[in-house]
């Protein structure tokens, strides 16, 4: 079978000589149909991640078809459409801590076949394609966890137009909340409005965009989706309403962080998001099915162009998710 692996010094190499794995008791073999990229994967492939992934098959997110099952498997049958969970062993309840993940400690999805424990898979929603389903494990579930509890009468602020932000916008709108977004591109601003954003702030034209968000929202956003981390947190503190919440889902922008005194005066909550459990994933999929939500895909690359997909992701910014398809 074919598989891409991370090379010493960064980059991907393709091999077609790996044997097709067989499932052991409690495991299933999945024929991979599609995968998607996250910011974490870019760092892994470039060799800049905190875990050395040299020789590892990358990508934590993928979807496919069950092709074989081991003894004792009861959750799935041959032919079922499945998608992997980001945290393989977090099934339900509070976050148990960061365990061993795919793409770093174990081989990931950028291959023709994967063998996984049946407990680390969920069913693909009937309304979604494999390419759409492959976008769900990290970005969608992170967004779902970040906006949980937001509804009618609330305002959500999302930063940019990457996968997590676009999913958060969609989930918040399904829940009846108002959404304001930031971007640096007028075309993307129009697309964010088309998805349901009621206001968009250009952060290059307005570097102190937090003040403008407070004006647009009449006192601040009740929930802020924080993508940049240290580089944007100060503006998120300015943008959040008194008693509101900042959901920290990334740390992609360099900077000095926030003024703690200013944050203290907001009486707000700062909460970090660690994707979600399998139970959360299943509830999210129910909402996707009921609401008819369709993931936004920036571009689909064929499997043999995986290095080009990573390069496209690195160049950014993209609108929605970057996907690699085995059938493209």
Image (cartoon, grey):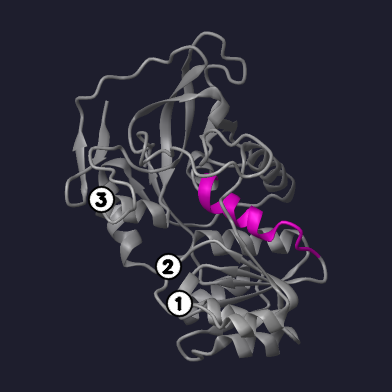
Q: Which of 300 and 57 is in front in this view?
A: 57
Question: What kind of element bears circle 2?
Answer: loop
Which residue is labeled 3 in the image?
307
Mark 2 Cα within 10 Å, few/some/many (few <14, many 20+)?
some
- Nearest to the eye among marks 3 and 1: give it: 1
* Percent coordinates x, y for residue 247 in the rendering: 62, 64
The residue stretch that appears in magenta = 137-151
Q: Residue 267 carries which label?
A: none
Q: Are marks 2 and 1 in contact (CB under 8 Å)?
A: yes
Q: Please identify the quadrant where the N terminus is shown.
A: top left
Give the image quarter of residue 124.
top right
What kind of element bears circle 1? helix
253 up-or-down from 46: above or below: below
- At a point 43% along the width and 42% down the height, the residue shown is 60
Ranked by sequence position, the earlier of labels 2 and 1 is 1
Could you give the CA–CA distance between mark 3 and mark 1, rounded to whole angstroms?
28 Å
Can you say which quadrant of the picture contains the C terminus?
top left
Q: Is residue 235 above or below residue 56?
A: below
Q: Main secondary structure of the magenta part?
A: helix
Question: Viewer-proximal residue, 118 or 285?
Answer: 118
Residue 56 in the image: state x and y as whole percent: 28, 37
* Vertical relation: 208 (above or below) 309: below
Residue farthest right in this picture = 153
Q: Give the residue pinned by disc 1.
A: 231
Secondary element under disc 3, as helix, strand or loop, is: helix
Any magenta on residue 92? no
From the viewer's perspective, is 246 left or right of 28?
A: right
Question: What residue is pinned by disc 2?
Answer: 252
């Amino acid at each position: 079978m074919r598989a891409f692996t991370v090379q010493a010094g960064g980059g991907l190499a393709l091999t077609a000589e790996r044997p097709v794995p067989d499932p052991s008791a409690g495991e299933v073999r999945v024929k991979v149909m599609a995968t998607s990229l996250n910011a974490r994967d870019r760092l892994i492939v470039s060799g800049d991640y905190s875990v050395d992934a040299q020789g590892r098959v990358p990508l934590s997110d993928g979807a496919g078809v069950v092709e074989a099952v081991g003894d004792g498997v009861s959750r799935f049958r041959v032919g079922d459409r499945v998608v992997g969970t980001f945290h393989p062993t977090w099934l339900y309840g509070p976050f148990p801590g960061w365990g061993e993940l795919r793409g770093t400690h174990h081989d990931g999805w950028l291959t023709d076949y994967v063998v996984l424990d049946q407990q680390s898979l969920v069913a693909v929603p009937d309304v979604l394609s494999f390419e759409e389903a492959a976008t769900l494990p990290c970005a969608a579930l992170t967004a779902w966890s970040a906006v949980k509890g937001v509804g009618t009468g609330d305002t959500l602020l999302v930063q940019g137009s990457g996968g997590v932000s676009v999913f958060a916008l969609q989930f918040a709108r399904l829940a009846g909340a108002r959404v304001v977004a930031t971007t640096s591109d007028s075309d993307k601003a129009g697309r964010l409005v088309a998805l349901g954003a009621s206001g968009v702030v250009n952060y290059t034209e307005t570097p102190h965009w937090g003040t403008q968000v407070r004006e647009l929202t009449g006192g601040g956003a009740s929930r802020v989706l924080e993508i940049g981390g240290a580089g944007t947190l100060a503006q998120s503190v300015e943008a959040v309403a008194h008693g509101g919440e900042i959901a920290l889902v990334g740390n992609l922008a360099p900077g000095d962080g926030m003024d703690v005194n200013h944050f203290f005066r907001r009486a707000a909550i700062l909460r970090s998001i660690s994707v979600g459990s399998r139970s959360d994933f299943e509830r999210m999929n129910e909402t996707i099915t009921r609401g008819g939500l369709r993931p936004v895909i920036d571009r689909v690359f064929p499997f043999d162009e995986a290095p080009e997909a990573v390069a496209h992701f690195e160049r950014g910014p993209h609108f929605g998710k970057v996907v690699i398809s085995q059938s493209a």
